[in-house]
Image (cartoon, helix red, strand yellow):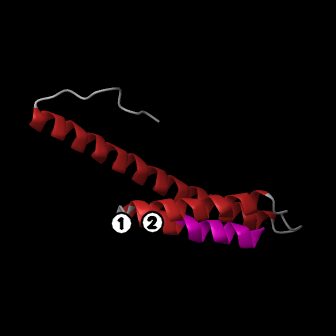
Amino acid sequence: MLMHIDEMHVRLGALVGALDGQDPGAIIAASEALATAVILFRSAPIPAGSEGEARVLIADVLKQLEAAAIRVNLLKDWTRQRIDRNHALRGSAPRGMALRY
């Protein structure tokens, strides 16, 4: 189980790096790798006596997850701004509602 937490940590780091690089292909690949790591983590038992270490590692993973979420929101906002600027340049109004998560 601890190995699976480490794997999630590595995969989250790769996702944050892909988000920083703004490469859609890398973001998709990193997201899929992270999803696989999460599935393996969820099915893994916690070894007896390692609950404290697991809590610390999980807390670190949650911090990385928050960093990834911040980057996703930032990229979403930048994209919305670009769309709005393009509409302003064309003199048109956006069609449809902006997505909110």
- The residue located at (74%, 62%) in the rendering is 41
Crowding around mark 1 (Cα neighbors within 10 Å: few <14, some 14 to 19, many 20+) is few
Q: Nearer the viewer, residue 50 or 1?
A: 1
Mark 1 or mark 2, which has the lower sequence index?
Answer: 1
Q: Is residue 81 above or below residue 1?
A: above
Question: Which mark, residue 100?
Answer: none
User: Residue 66: horizontal and vertical position, in percent?
Assistant: 51, 53
Q: Determine the residue positioned at 86% across, 68% down.
A: 47
Magenta range is: 1-12
* Contact? badges 1 and 2 (CB < 8 Å): yes
Classify residue 43 by image quadrant. bottom right
How crowded pointer 2 is (Cα within 10 Å; few <14, some 14-19, many 20+) is rated as: some
Report if residue 99 lies within the magenta region: no
In the image, is residue 64 above or below residue 101?
Answer: below
Q: What x and y, as percent, mark residue 18?
A: 43, 65
Q: Secondary structure at mark 1?
A: helix
Name which quarter of the figure residue 84 lies in: top left
- Principal SS element in the magenta part? helix
Amino acid type for the residue under numbered disc 1: Gly
Q: Is residue 20 left or right of residue 46?
A: left
Residue at 65 percent across and 71 percent down: it is 7
The image quadrant where one finds the N terminus is: bottom right
- Where residue 75 appears, as percent x and y from the top left, is 35, 50
Q: Nearer the viewer, residue 86 or 73?
A: 86
Residue with the mark numbered 2: 26
Q: Nearer the viewer, mark 1 or mark 2?
A: 2
As drawn, the residue found furthest toward the right would be 48
Say what amino acid the circle numbered 2 marks. Answer: Ala
Q: Which residue is mark 1?
A: 21
Q: Mark 1 and mark 2: span between their CA atoms?
A: 8 Å
